């Protein structure tokens, strides 16, 4: 059992806001040999598993804890730096996090890592190096190129393959409607599944690869397998529903997100309820509305009242804005839509998420227009 505590190193969006996983055993099978002692090895595998599940905040806390105990272990610094970088997520890394990540990798490079470890550290450093002057898009491209070389140099390394696949998804063309890169990534990840079917990366990243209208049917098999390797990880219970939503599998969408929300509530937080809780409920409400289960959707929305405050992060802000907007617009409750509360709940830093706050004003504007209240519609517009 690991007890994860908040330490000095943190950054905006994570401090005092993260799930504490009391039992980190159910993450799948991750075996990445490092040149450190047995305790560091066990901690590193756990942290790497969290990274592959994109439980970044939890990985950050774990690596922080073990760095204070094992400051001589180079790959713990690599893990910490990777926990700050969320390549597929819409959040924006802070300058503080960039500085911390770069500092960690500089420290790692001075600890005489093994050649393989040095290759991983160097690849991560491509994202952080000269972050003050090099645009993020260029640094991500360098990071992806480095992972392609890592994959070529270590073709039998499961994690090198996994991170290469992830990097290709990150740089995939947004205008390619055939999703050719995603298809390639899916085939690459199949080789990981063949070698180690319980490795979390292949299942998780496959779902991301197939999370589009063209390839969604290919995502059903990994989606239905994800909870078997990580039944207690909220994101592992939620992520398959990206595929279920695309295919109209509404009962599965509802059921899996109910499980995800319940899992998120099981883990204590120091200051708030996990963002994974409301993220799952947003999808659950969407599924209920598609089945015409308006009353159940309303009850689900009401459950949140007893779990405030929620993490002050982008995903939480999005869910908290989207859920009431969905409820009113999907049911054509125009008057209710026109009266939605703005900047609610007030503890969320809405000024940091204007594109999310706009959802509320959009719903209010549509509701006002449909209620023949032109002044209000113009005001919200």
Image (spheres, rainbow, N blue to C red):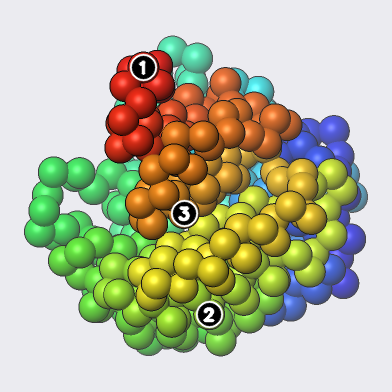
The residue sitting at 62% across, 65% down in the picture is: 299
Residue 349 in picture, x, y percent from top left: 64, 27
- Secondary structure of the residue carrying tag 2 is helix
* Local crowd size for mark 1, using a 10 Å CA cut-off: few (<14), some (14–19), many (≥20): few
Separation of disc 2 and disc 1 at Cα?
Answer: 42 Å
Name which of mark 1 and mark 3 comes first in the sequence: 3
- Outermost residue toward the front in this view: 372
Of residue 40 and residue 252, the one placed in the foreground of this image is 252
Quarter occupied by residue 343: top right
Position of 350 with respect to 365 (left or right) is right
- Secondary structure of the residue carrying tag 3 is helix
Position of 57 with respect to 5 (left or right) is left
Separation of disc 1 and disc 3 at Cα?
Answer: 23 Å
Classify 134 as above or below 264: above
Of residue 358 and residue 178, the one placed in the foreground of this image is 358
Q: Nearer the viewer, mark 3 or mark 2?
A: 3
Q: Which residue is mark 2?
A: 255
**Which of the image's four quarters has the C terminus?**
top left
- Secondary structure of the residue carrying tag 1 is helix
Q: Which residue is mark 3?
A: 327
Classify 270 as above or below 348: below
* Local crowd size for mark 3, using a 10 Å CA cut-off: few (<14), some (14–19), many (≥20): many
Q: Nearer the viewer, mark 1 or mark 3?
A: 1
Of residue 130 and residue 354, the one placed in the foreground of this image is 354
Of residue 214 and residue 191, the one placed in the foreground of this image is 214
Classify 69 as above or below 366: below
């Amino acid at each position: 059992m690991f007890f994860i505590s908040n330490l000095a190193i943190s950054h905006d969006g994570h401090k005092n806001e993260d799930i504490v996983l009391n039992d980190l055993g159910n993450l799948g099978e991750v075996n990445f040999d490092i040149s450190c002692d047995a305790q560091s090895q066990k901690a590193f595998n756990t942290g790497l598993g969290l990274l592959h599940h994109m439980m970044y905040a939890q990985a950050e806390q774990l690596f922080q804890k073990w760095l204070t105990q094992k400051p001589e272990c180079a790959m713990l610094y690599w893990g910490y730096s990777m926990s700050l970088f969320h390549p597929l997520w819409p959040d924006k890394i802070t300058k503080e996090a960039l500085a911390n990540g770069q500092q960690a990798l500089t420290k790692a490079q001075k600890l005489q890592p093994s050649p393989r470890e040095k290759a991983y550290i160097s690849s991560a450093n491509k994202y952080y190096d000269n972050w003050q002057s090099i645009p993020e898009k260029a640094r991500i491209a360098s990071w992806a190129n480095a992972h392609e070389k890592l994959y070529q140099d270590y073709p039998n390394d499961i994690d090198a393959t996994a991170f290469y696949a992830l990097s290709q998804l990150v740089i995939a063309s947004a205008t390619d409607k055939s999703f050719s890169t995603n298809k390639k990534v899916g085939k690459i990840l199949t080789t990981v599944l063949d070698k180690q079917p319980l490795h979390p990366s292949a299942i998780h990243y496959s779902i991301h690869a197939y999370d589009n209208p063209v390839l969604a049917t290919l995502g059903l098999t990994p989606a239905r397998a994800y909870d078997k390797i990580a039944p207690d990880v909220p994101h592992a219970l939620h992520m398959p529903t990206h595929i279920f939503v695309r295919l109209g599998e509404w009962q599965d969408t509802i059921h899996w997100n109910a499980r995800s929300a319940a899992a998120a509530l099981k883990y204590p937080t120091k200051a708030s309820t996990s963002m994974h809780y409301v993220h799952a409920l947003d999808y659950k409400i969407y599924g209920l509305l598609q089945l015409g289960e308006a009353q159940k959707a309303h009850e689900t929305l009401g459950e949140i009242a007893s779990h405030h405050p929620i993490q002050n992060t982008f995903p939480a802000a999005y869910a908290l804005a989207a859920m009431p907007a969905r409820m009113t617009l999907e049911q054509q409750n125009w008057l209710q839509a026109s009266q939605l509360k703005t900047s609610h709940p007030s503890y969320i830093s809405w000024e940091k998420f204007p594109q999310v706050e706009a959802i509320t004003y959009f719903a209010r504007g549509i509701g006002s227009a449909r209620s023949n209240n032109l002044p209000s519609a113009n005001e919200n517009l």
